Image (cartoon, grey):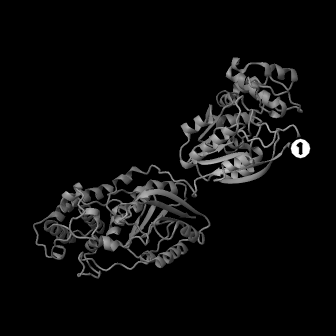
């Protein structure tokens, strides 16, 4: 690996070679583009060898050199062979006007002066003329052909430009990028003179402007690292960020007793473990039938995709699958998926789309289900839910499907039927829930004008269209989360959110479609209630104490797995509590934050409560 290392091609005042041992461990674990707008000698750039990078500098001679190394390294090497460590030649080359030279000769001049001038210093006067005296060396190496060629390979892949750092950052910096800023340092004494890299000076107002740009980059989600001198003025500018101080040597200073100093490294990374920006997810996800399911994570899928992108796993357990969108998403990624939900109707969503790789309802199946030329022996819905949720015709249609479904023997086809009828009921119902009777929340949606039969046919077609084979044996469970036993690499947890502001009881909201899926068997009906619901299933997430205990159980059980928890900022445990809890079981815990707006399902009277932060906790 050592033979592939690239050394900086120039010496540079304030070069970061000696600080790499401090900088490298502090780099973000993951980033998109690498941007260094004060590239100078590029010690970090050449050390990291980023494959997607932008480098720039206001020094036109330096940037021309990098461009020629990228585009004409052979010509540069041939030209350099005419240069020697000679005082007379040095001053002759120095006297030439670079603007009158070809780009390649100009680059050779720049490199020659850098290798043979005093201490490798680059300094210009007010007229922009290079004025560094001849340096005293013992046979300096002017041409390092091997290193130049390796640098050329890297620079060919890099966008190289000359210009003001602000212009570069405003045009190219995007969320998730890594920005390394190594500006001219704030002088710490009257002897300091690191700022004359160009004829333009970099004073206090420039440092303030740079700090403002760091704030802008940080706020947009960039990972920013900055180096500077340990000066009170600078530390005050960046006091809101993490600042580390390190002893360094000022190798450029002619007075050896003044070469010792202190540098700072400022890291302005997003406050959480990583910045989450949405990724482009497989288009197959667009085929998943939407539902009005409370807490559905459809909108979070692009963010989940970003979080799992670099994780090493082949199988997933979605322990609280709900609407099934997350299970289906992992299926589209080619993972083996184990999907569980304690609600029967919810597990049917996953069985029809995740476990099912190739089965669809045929036209003959649909005709059989819609056949009205039969005697309906069981009018449970029509008799018991008259006038509560649907019209008499819609209730009769439900009893028709319940009767005719018995003629379909294939269990996977049955899951499609059950999933389609549940979705039809939820789409036909204002707000998609069954906590009230009548149609008082009719918002004029087209869905509310369609009959259940029309909804059902539409849903069947959509579930059929969502079926695909990802090459894995996927499995669906309908069990209590504590009873599920399977060996998956990654466990995704999206349990009911406990909040003192609202209840999280899914049975109360979806008792009708759950009863329909179970044919109202093995449930304790509460006929005295207005909504004719049945008794809630027992769940630890209905109380604060139970919620905390359940998370402890889950983290202990899956401590050897990758665990991702989806949770909300208006729920308990809090972000800090969840992180502390996970750290007891996982060696590395990361937290990602997403602005999120929940739908009606959470039933907060204060609508502002529905706009919250969604957290993704990752335990490794």
Q: Is residue 323 placed above or below 287 in the rendered structure? A: below
**Which secondary structure lies at badge 1?**
helix
Q: Quadrant of residue 533?
A: bottom left
**10 Å crowding of disc 1: few (<14), some (14-19), many (20+):** few
- Measuring 74% from the left and 35% from the top, which residue is drawn there? 195
- Measuring 68% from the left and 22% from the top, which residue is drawn there? 103
Q: Position of residue 506 (x, y in %)?
A: 35, 71
Side (left or right) of 550 relative to 363: right
Side (left or right) of 428 relative to 39: left
Quadrant where the C terminus sits is bottom right
- Measuring 78% from the left and 30% from the top, which residue is drawn there? 114
Side (left or right) of 336 relative to 522: right
Q: Quadrant of residue 378?
A: bottom left
Q: Is residue 546 placed above or below 607 in the rendered structure? A: below
Q: Position of residue 439 (x, y in %)?
A: 21, 65
Q: Residue furthest top?
A: 100
Q: Which residue is mark 1?
A: 257
Q: 62 or 199: nearer the eye?
A: 199
- Measuring 70% from the left and 50% from the top, which residue is drawn there? 235
Q: Quadrant of residue 125?
A: top right
Q: Position of residue 124 (x, y in %)?
A: 76, 27
């Amino acid at each position: 690996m050592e033979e592939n290392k690239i050394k900086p091609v120039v010496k540079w005042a304030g070069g970061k070679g000696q600080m790499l041992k401090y900088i490298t461990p502090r780099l973000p674990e993951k980033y998109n583009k690498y941007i260094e707008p004060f590239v100078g000698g590029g010690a970090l750039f050449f050390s990291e060898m980023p494959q997607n990078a932008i480098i720039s500098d206001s020094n036109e001679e330096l940037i021309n050199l990098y461009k020629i190394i990228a585009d004409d390294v052979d010509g540069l090497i041939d030209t350099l062979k005419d240069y020697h460590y000679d005082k007379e030649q040095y001053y002759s080359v120095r006297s030439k006007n670079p603007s009158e030279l070809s780009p390649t000769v100009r680059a050779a001049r720049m490199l020659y002066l850098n290798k043979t001038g005093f201490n490798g210093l680059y300094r210009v006067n007010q007229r922009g003329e290079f004025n560094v005296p001849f340096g005293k060396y013992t046979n300096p190496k002017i041409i390092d052909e091997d290193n130049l060629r390796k640098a050329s390979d890297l620079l060919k892949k890099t966008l190289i430009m000359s210009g003001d750092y602000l212009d570069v950052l405003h045009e190219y910096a995007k969320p998730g990028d890594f920005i390394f800023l190594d500006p001219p340092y704030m002088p710490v004494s009257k002897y300091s003179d690191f700022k004359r890299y160009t004829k333009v000076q970099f004073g206090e107002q420039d440092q303030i402007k740079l700090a403002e740009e760091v704030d802008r980059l940080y706020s947009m989600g960039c990972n920013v690292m900055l180096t500077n001198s340990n000066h009170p003025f600078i530390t005050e500018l960046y006091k809101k960020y993490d600042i580390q101080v390190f002893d360094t040597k000022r190798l450029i200073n002619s007075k050896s007793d003044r070469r010792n100093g202190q540098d700072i490294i400022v890291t302005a990374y997003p406050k959480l473990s990583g910045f989450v920006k949405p990724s482009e997810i497989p288009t197959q996800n667009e085929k998943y039938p939407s539902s009005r399911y409370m807490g559905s994570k459809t909108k979070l899928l692009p963010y989940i995709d970003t979080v799992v992108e670099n994780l090493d796993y082949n199988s997933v357990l979605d322990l609280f699958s709900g609407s099934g969108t997350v299970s289906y998403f992992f299926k589209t990624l080619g993972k083996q998926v184990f999907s569980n939900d304690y609600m029967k109707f919810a597990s049917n969503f996953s069985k029809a789309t995740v476990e099912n790789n190739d089965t669809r309802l045929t036209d003959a199946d649909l005709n059989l289900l819609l056949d009205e030329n039969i005697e309906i022996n069981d009018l449970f819905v029509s008799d018991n839910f008259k006038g509560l949720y649907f019209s008499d015709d819609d209730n009769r249609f439900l009893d028709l499907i319940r009767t005719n479904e018995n003629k379909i023997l294939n269990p996977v086809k049955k899951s499609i039927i059950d999933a389609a009828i549940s979705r039809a009921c939820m789409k036909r119902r204002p707000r998609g829930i069954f906590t009230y009777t009548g149609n008082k929340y009719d918002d004029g949606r087209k869905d509310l004008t369609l009959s259940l039969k029309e909804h059902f046919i539409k849903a069947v077609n959509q579930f059929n269209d969502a079926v695909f084979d990802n090459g894995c044996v996927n499995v669906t469970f309908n069990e209590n989360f504590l009873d599920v036993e399977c060996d998956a690499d990654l466990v995704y947890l999206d349990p009911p959110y406990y909040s003192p502001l609202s209840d999280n009881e899914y049975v109360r909201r979806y008792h009708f479609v759950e009863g329909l899926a179970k044919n109202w068997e093995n449930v304790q009906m509460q006929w005295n209630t207005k909504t004719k619901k049945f008794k809630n299933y027992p769940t630890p997430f209905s109380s604060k104490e139970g919620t905390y205990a359940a998370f402890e159980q889950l983290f202990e059980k899956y401590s050897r797995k990758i665990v991702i928890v989806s949770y909300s900022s208006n729920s308990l445990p809090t972000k800090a509590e969840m992180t502390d809890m996970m750290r007891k079981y996982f060696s590395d815990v990361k937290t990602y934050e997403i602005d999120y707006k929940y739908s009606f399902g959470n039933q907060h009277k204060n609508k502002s409560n529905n706009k919250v932060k969604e957290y993704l906790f990752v335990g490794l």
